[in-house]
């Protein structure tokens, strides 16, 4: 299921971009990258604020929804600004455009697919539902960090995105506390485990 979803997202995104020119795909790549990094950089305080305002009514749903809402909002705003600031597409000489366009489109598609898989850590799914690969076996943040260090970014698209977010949102670059893949995976793993137990109890009662 994990790799099937990754493949579907990858090829669906690529299909939408492969016929676009190099300039359009470069802008799309930039907006998607900034949108994804912004989502992972600011989603947590937004989730906390909404969770407190709703008294925990949507605890298991908020992380996933907020990640995607922030992503969609930032991408939409940047795309709109790009259209206003660059109404005419920059033209590249042949064969740069027909070759470069699909290549950049493929990079953008991989980026979106990796981002998507990383957000499934926050999805309201049980620990063993659909994506058991995402559930950490470590019982502490340090143990999860060690576990993640042993995973390849080439075989785990979600880890590839989390590593990218960790590097791009590093406190050395932006200040603040940065982004920790281990904390993200550990915390949301606990959420999914709790959600699994809660749904199991509801099923048993029925």
Image: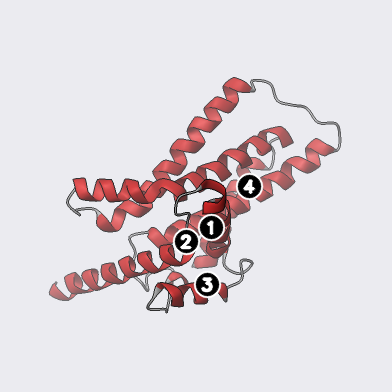
Q: Distance between the residues labelled 4 and 2?
A: 23 Å
Q: Position of residue 57 (x, y in %)?
A: 19, 53
Query: Most extreme residue toward the left, as rendered?
Result: 205
Name the residue tied to disc 1.
166
Q: How far apart are marks 2 and 3 (CA)?
A: 11 Å
Q: Which of marks 3 and 1 is nearer the N terminus?
A: 3
User: Can residue 91 be seen at all in this image of the molecule?
Assistant: yes
Q: Earlier in the sequence, mark 3 or mark 4?
A: 4
> Is 86 on the left-hand or right-hand side of 119?
right
Q: Is residue 81 above or below residue 59?
A: above
Q: How crowded is mark 1: few (under 14 residues within 10 Å), some or many (20 or more)?
A: some
Q: Earlier in the sequence, mark 1 or mark 2?
A: 1
Name the residue tied to disc 2.
180
Name the residue tied to disc 3.
148
The disc label shown at residue 132, or none: none
Label 1: element kind = helix
> Is 49 on the left-hand or right-hand side of 55?
right
Label 2: element kind = loop
Residue drawn at (39%, 69%), measured in percent from left and top?
A: 186
Tell me if label 4 and label 2 are in contact, CB under 8 Å: no
Tell me if label 1 and label 2 are in contact, CB under 8 Å: yes
Label 4: element kind = helix
Q: Is residue 85 above or below residue 181?
A: above
Residue drawn at (41%, 72%), measured in percent from left and top?
A: 141
User: In front: mark 3 or mark 1?
Assistant: 1
Q: Residues within 10 Å of mark 2 (few under 14, many from 20)?
A: some
Q: Where is residue 130 in the image (x, y as percent from the top left)?
A: 41, 68
Q: How crowded is mark 4: few (under 14 residues within 10 Å), some or many (20 or more)?
A: many
Q: Which of marks 4 and 1 is nearer the N terminus?
A: 4
The structure's colour scheme is secondary structure
Residue drawn at (55%, 42%), measured in percent from left and top?
A: 34
Name the residue tied to disc 4.
108
């Amino acid at each position: 299921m994990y790799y099937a979803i990754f493949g579907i997202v990858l090829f669906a995104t690529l299909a939408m971009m492969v016929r676009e020119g190099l300039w359009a795909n470069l802008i799309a790549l930039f907006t998607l990258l900034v949108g994804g990094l912004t989502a992972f950089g600011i989603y947590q305080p937004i989730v906390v604020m909404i969770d407190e305002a709703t008294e925990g009514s949507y605890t298991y749903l908020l992380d996933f929804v907020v990640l995607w809402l922030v992503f969609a909002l930032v991408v939409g705003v940047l795309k709109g600004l790009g259209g206003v600031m660059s109404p005419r597409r920059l033209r590249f000489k042949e064969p740069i455009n027909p070759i470069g366009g699909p290549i950049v489109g493929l990079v953008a598609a991989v980026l979106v697919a990796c981002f998507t898989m990383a957000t499934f850590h926050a999805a309201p799914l049980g620990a063993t539902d659909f994506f058991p690969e995402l559930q950490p076996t470590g019982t502490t943040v340090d143990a999860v960090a060690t576990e993640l260090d042993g995973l390849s970014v080439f075989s785990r698209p979600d880890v590839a995105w989390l590593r990218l977010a960790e590097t791009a949102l590093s406190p050395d670059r932006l200040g603040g506390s940065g982004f920790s893949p281990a904390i993200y995976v550990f915390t949301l793993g606990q959420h999914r485990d709790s959600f699994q137990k809660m749904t199991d109890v509801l099923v048993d009662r029925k």
